[in-house]
Image (spheres, helix red, strand yellow):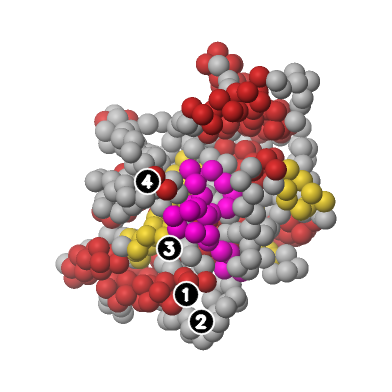
């Protein structure tokens, strides 16, 4: 990494909970925290390019308002705490481009619903974080804002599509961020950057306002995608989730209220987990598998009931193929006609005997409504299998990606890209989607927690996948693992409160 002076302070790597406590005790003001975070970004982000839209003026106004609320005696876990949001969320007056050059000048006039919720809770929004074009990549770069680098190795990606948020958190640009996930876009960047993230149960958090440019921000229920919190500490994930979760007031909120069940286990010794390091349709790098096995051994020492196989585990081969079809159908639904016709031409000549995952995606991209309904029924069967699984287990612990962060690769055709796993080339898209689909297809909650490092010092995370609407179970297990075995460790180049990076 090039040498540059990096400003930092005692607050740079403090958690949101620690900042809220300091604010409540009048040890620091919200304006001081905002200015401190802004200075950190200005001194360090040149090496990363994580913050693509800076909203400092409005952030300082929000911070001043938070200080006034604190002076009146108000307290809250987000009140006065600086944070960032993913570029894809509407923020009044700021660009929302999704990386599309033609949307460079687009400015929504209303905040995304969850952005308005964090603002109401008193959070201070410093700016927006970089994304891939259309949020459709495991890396974060586009022609408008450029390439975002990994804080642990700038020659590598921080992941996508919430890669800018993950890099910002790891670099100390505030303790919280908001992201989204359909193919691991919260979880993969968290794994690559050594932080925490939570993919909520499907539709637990309303997505209104994470809307492609020029489209109206209307209420909707998604079939696969979610929006959710990212942080450097497990407790902060829960605080942010509580601020943003709950039905959209324009639709379901008219009649429904949120009441999540408590965690199944409050001690590691009470937890029943299945630990899985290998997928039937693709390899796992030995460094990732070793970190997961080490975690399993530590959980056993802590008294947890740890299994490594079970006949109750749903068929991952069939579920993965189903996921590939469904995620491709959703991804291509709003594709420009010319691009869709090119894909349709490939699908038309596809060999019926082709059982590759790439073929499944082609079939899904051009699926008829009849075919979609049939797949939706199959997904219902997968969900039933998971319900049976969770009668015997509290969580599944498994990889998020088969490798740690990989070198930047901007080959335009994603299907031509390759990942190196245990020294051998593997299909890029196949492997990036394998593990995220485990939780995405059935809509289950999944919390990412950092658990180790590769020999090169790159972070390794795992996902804790839990039962439907039992988000508190996975978040509590993440907190217990963090408490027992350690969690986020700052990148060496950014770890100091000053000095060189």
Q: Are marks 2 and 1 in contact (CB under 8 Å)?
A: yes
Q: Are marks 4 and 1 in contact (CB under 8 Å)?
A: no
Let me know if residue 455 appears in the view: yes
Q: Are marks 2 and 3 in contact (CB under 8 Å)?
A: no
State left or right for residue 236 relative to residue 422.
Answer: left
Label 2 to label 3: alpha-carbon separation: 17 Å
- Identify the residue at image location x=54%, y=76%: 494
Q: Quadrant of the N terminus?
A: bottom right
Q: Which numbered tag is attached to residue 51? A: 3
For label 2, the residue is 4
Determine the image quadrant of residue 381. Answer: top right
Closer to the chain start, of discs 4 and 1, is 1
* Nearer to us in this view, 82 or 469: 82
Q: Quadrant of the C terminus?
A: bottom right
Closer to the chain start, of discs 2 and 1, is 2
Q: Which numbered tag is attached to residue 103? A: 4
State left or right for residue 276 relative to residue 494.
Answer: right
Determine the image quadrant of residue 391. Answer: top right
Mark 3 vs mark 4: in front: 4
Closer to the chain start, of discs 2 and 3, is 2
Label 2 to label 1: alpha-carbon separation: 8 Å
The secondary structure that dominates the magenta segment is: loop
**Label 1: few (<14), some (14–19) or many (≥20) C-alpha neighbours in 10 Å:** many
Report the span colored magenta: 131-152
Identify whether 55 is placed above or below 477. below
Q: Circle 2 sits in a helix, a strand or a loop, which is it?
A: loop
């Amino acid at each position: 990494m090039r040498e540059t002076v990096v400003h930092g302070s005692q607050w740079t790597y403090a958690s949101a909970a620690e900042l809220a406590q300091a604010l409540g005790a009048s040890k620091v003001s919200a304006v001081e925290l905002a200015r401190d975070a802004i200075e950190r970004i200005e001194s360090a982000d040149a090496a990363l390019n994580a913050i693509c839209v800076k909203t400092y003026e409005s952030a300082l106004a929000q911070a001043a308002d938070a200080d006034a609320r604190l002076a009146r005696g108000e307290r809250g876990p987000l009140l006065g705490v600086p944070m960032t949001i993913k570029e894809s969320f509407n923020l009044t007056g700021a660009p929302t481009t999704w990386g599309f050059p033609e949307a460079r000048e687009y400015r929504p006039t209303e905040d995304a619903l969850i952005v308005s919720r964090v603002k109401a809770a008193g959070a201070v929004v410093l700016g927006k974080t970089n994304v891939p074009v259309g949020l459709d990549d495991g890396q974060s770069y586009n022609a408008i804002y450029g390439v975002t680098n990994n804080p642990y190795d700038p020659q590598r990606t921080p992941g996508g599509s919430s890669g800018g948020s993950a890099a910002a958190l790891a670099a100390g640009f505030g303790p919280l961020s908001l992201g989204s996930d359909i193919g691991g876009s919260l979880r993969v960047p968290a794994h690559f950057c050594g932080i925490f993230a939570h993919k909520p149960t499907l539709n637990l958090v309303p997505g209104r306002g994470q809307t492609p440019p020029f489209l109206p921000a209307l209420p909707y229920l998604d079939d696969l995608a979610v929006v959710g919190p990212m942080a450097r500490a497990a407790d902060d994930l829960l605080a942010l989730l509580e601020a943003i979760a709950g039905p959209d007031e324009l639709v379901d909120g008219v009649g429904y209220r949120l009441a999540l069940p408590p965690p199944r286990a409050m001690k590691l010794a009470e937890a029943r987990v299945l630990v899985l390091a290998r997928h039937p349709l693709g390899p796992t790098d030995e460094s990732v598998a070793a970190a997961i096995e080490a975690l399993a051994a530590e959980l056993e020492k802590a008294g947890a009931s740890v299994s490594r196989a079970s006949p109750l585990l749903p068929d991952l081969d069939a579920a993965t193929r189903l996921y590939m079809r469904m995620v491709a159908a959703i991804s291509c639904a709003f594709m420009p006609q010319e691009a869709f016709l090119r894909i349709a031409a490939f699908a038309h000549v596809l060999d019926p005997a082709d059982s590759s995952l790439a073929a499944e995606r082609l079939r899904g991209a051009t699926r008829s409504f009849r075919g979609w309904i049939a797949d939706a029924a199959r997904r219902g069967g997968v969900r039933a299998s998971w319900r049976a699984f969770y009668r015997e287990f509290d969580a599944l612990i498994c990889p998020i990606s088969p490798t740690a962060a990989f070198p930047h690769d901007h080959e335009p055709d994603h299907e031509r890209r390759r990942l190196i796993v245990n020294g051998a080339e593997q299909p890029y898209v196949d492997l990036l989607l394998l593990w995220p689909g485990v939780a995405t297809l059935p809509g289950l909650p999944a919390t990412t927690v950092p658990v180790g490092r590769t020999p090169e010092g790159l972070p390794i995370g795992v996902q804790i996948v839990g039962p439907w609407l039992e988000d508190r179970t996975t978040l509590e297990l993440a907190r217990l693992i963090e408490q027992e075995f350690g969690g986020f460790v700052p990148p060496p180049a950014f770890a100091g409160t000053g000095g060189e990076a």
